[in-house]
Image: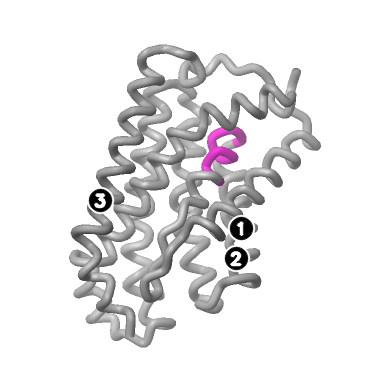
Amino acid sequence: MKNNPTRKLTVLAMICALGFIAMFFFRFNVGFLTFDFKDAILSVGALIYGPVAGAICSILVAVVESVTIGDTGPYGLIMDILSSSAFLIPCGIVYKYKRSFSGAIIAAVSSVIAVVAVMAIANVFITPLYTGASRSDVVGMLPTLLLPFNLSKGLMNASVMLLIYKPVTNILRKTSLLPPSNSTVDRKDKKSIILAVSSLVVLVLTAIFVVVVMKGNFTLFDA
């Protein structure tokens, strides 16, 4: 059974809806910074259908978020699109050409690196426009707050992505929305178990780091 446009649109619509729900119910704000897991959900679409699908999902969900619960205006929308796209596009590109266990790892690492790099530049040039902080202040916050925040958010989303990809795609195949796959990531073997356990460990350690180590820095932009 091959994918057709109707099935593809159905799957992507479901993933976007789940991404918005995850963002709505599982997020917390500290000043202008927001931790959420929508990129982990949306990345499933990028892993299945490639980087273009990932970019489309990131834009759609960011726009819906902006017009429903967003409070940071157009600059916040731009930052949201940049952040999600930086995460989704690399993993979509890597996994499109390397659908394997190692490909999944490389995809996750690539997404984290891209998010940190892209958002560092975006923070310097866009963050001052809607926070009221000077560019020099924002640059000063990069090593102590902004880079650790983006790294932590990227690691958490990458970990959740690796945890949910297999279960979600298995459900989609059982409902005939996806064809069978020969990807080595989908096989029940020791590597899959190691991947799941490792992802869970990274997720827990990163969450502890955010709560314990970064908590004191969050107050810097609360005013």
C-alpha distance separating marks 3 and 2? 27 Å
Q: Where does the magenta region start and end?
A: 42-49
SS under mark 1: helix
Across and down, in percent, residue 218 comes to 28, 71
The residue that appears at 31% across and 30% down in the rendered structure is: 198
Task: Kindly identify which residue carries mark 2.
Answer: 65
Q: Nearer the viewer, residue 159 or 137?
A: 159
Q: Nearer the viewer, residue 9 or 221?
A: 221
Task: Kindly identify which residue carries mark 1.
Answer: 61
Looking at the image, residue 164 sits to the left or right of residue 10; the answer is left
SS under mark 2: helix
Residue 202 in the magenta stretch? The answer is no
Dominant secondary structure, magenta: helix
The image shows a total of numbered marks equal to 3
Across and down, in percent, residue 61 comes to 61, 58
Q: Tell me whether circle 2 and circle 1 mark residues in contact (CB < 8 Å).
A: yes
Amino acid found under the numbered disc labelled 1: Val
